[in-house]
Amino acid sequence: MIFTVAIDGPAAAGKGTIGRAVAARFGFAHLDTGLLYRAVAAMGGDPVAAARRLSAADLARDDLRSLAAGQAASRVAVIPEVRAALVAFQRRFARAEGGAVLDGRDIGTVICPEAEVKLYVTASAEVRAQRRWLEVGGDAAAVLAEVMERDARDMGRADAPLRAAADAVILDTSDLSIETAVAQAMAAVEKALPQR
């Protein structure tokens, strides 16, 4: 069965948590597409060349979850040639047999506009900054400023800006527990799955 769940939204909204839970529940493969950009940035050198030679091993680095890696990823993600080099990889993953969940910034709008389920997971900047601060520490005000700066960059870029697909189910996790957010996402997937 080919079945794609596209999950988009800003940093620290809960996309990864929801994506992993949905993939585990339905037995789908999962790809955190942000890791692609983080890995490209971490590889150093020319980002376009790095994107073209990216391998699965590059996604296993243990330094890809830092705040600095996220900021670097956002900077390389605005380069059209980097985005183009990673599109084919993501599309192959999404349409592989067995089902797939991809979470990122432009999955439902650009990478997989034909996805069977599209979710847009969001939360207020303050809530997302608090979550990120709990994860990485540092100065809380600086983390909020970085979250807002990244939002502006991701939403304002000319190529594939972050936005909800017209047919996406919107999940605002600002006031939701993880369990409730995951349950709502699973309900949307269950509703779209072909009867087995």
Image: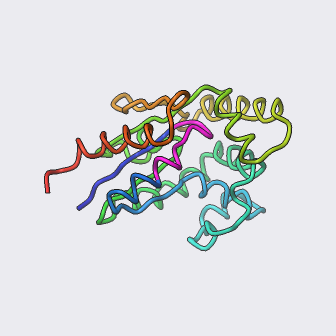
Q: Quadrant of the N terminus?
A: bottom left
Q: Position of residue 92 (x, y in %)?
A: 40, 62
Q: Return the residue nearer the eye: 14 or 78.
A: 14
In this view, which residue lies farthest toward the left?
195
The residues colored magenta run: 9-19
Q: Quadrant of the C terminus?
A: bottom left
Task: Name the residue rendered at 68%, 26% in the picture.
Answer: 126
16 in magenta: yes
Task: Name the residue rendered at 53%, 37% in the picture.
Answer: 9
Q: Is residue 29 left or right of residue 178?
A: left
Q: Where, by quadrant of the figure, is residue 165 drawn?
A: top left
Q: How many marks?
A: 0
Task: Name the residue rendered at 28%, 54% in the picture.
Answer: 3
On screen, residue 17 above or below 97? above
Colour scheme employed for the rendering of this structure = rainbow
Q: Is residue 144 left or right of residue 157?
A: right
Q: Return the residue nearer the eye: 182 or 23.
A: 182
In this view, which residue lies farthest toward the bottom?
57
Q: Position of residue 178 (x, y in %)?
A: 50, 41
54 in magenta: no
Q: Is residue 7 left or right of residue 76?
A: left
Q: Position of residue 186 (x, y in %)?
A: 34, 45
In this view, which residue lies farthest toward the right?
139
On screen, residue 131 above or below 49? above
Q: Return the residue nearer the eye: 1 or 53.
A: 1
